[in-house]
Image (cartoon, rainbow, N blue to C red):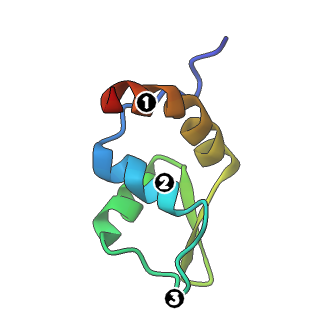
Amino acid sequence: MSNDFDFDLSSDQWEALKALRNPVSNGRLAKAYVVESLIKLGLVVMNDGVPAMTPTGRKVLVRGSCRLLDLVA
């Protein structure tokens, strides 16, 4: 298995990435600086002023889900 999608994201970044699975109706997230950091990592792009997850962002979210479960336990 490749580690191409192994990112060390903060909890705020994980929450923002998860929130982008189902975009907010007005297209805005509360913490714009978190979205900007995800854009710099190539996990999110802006489409007509609305943040959207990239294919890489989706892969990171799916692969990182196991880590998120470990944090809950």
**Secondary-structure class at tag 2:** helix
x and y percent of residue 55 in the render?
70, 48
Residue corresponding to mark 3? 26
Residue type pointed to by label 3: Asn
Upstream in sequence: badge 2 or badge 1: 2
Upstream in sequence: badge 3 or badge 2: 2
Task: Tell me what residue is drawn at x 54 percent, y 58 percent.
Answer: 44
Which residue is most to the top? 1
**Secondary-structure class at tag 3:** loop
Q: For residue 17, which numbered disc appears in the image?
A: 2
Task: Tell me what residue is drawn at x 40 percent, y 47 percent.
Answer: 14
How far apart marks 3 and 2 lie (CA) works out to 16 Å
x and y percent of residue 13 in the render?
36, 50
Q: Is residue 13 above or below residue 67?
A: below
Q: Is residue 28 above or below residue 20?
A: below
Q: Is residue 21 above or below residue 7?
A: below
Instruction: Work out whether residue 54 or residue 29 is closer to the camera in this orientation and state it.
Output: 29
Q: Horizontally, is 13 left or right of 48 in the view?
A: left
Residue type pointed to by label 1: Leu
Task: Tell me what residue is drawn at x 50 percent, y 54 percent.
Answer: 18
Task: Tell me what residue is drawn at x 54 percent, y 49 percent.
Answer: 42
Q: Is residue 11 above or below residue 39?
A: above
Residue corresponding to mark 1? 69
Instruction: Work out whether residue 21 or residue 48 is closer to the camera in this orientation and state it.
Output: 21
Pointer 3 with pointer 1, Cβ within 8 A: no
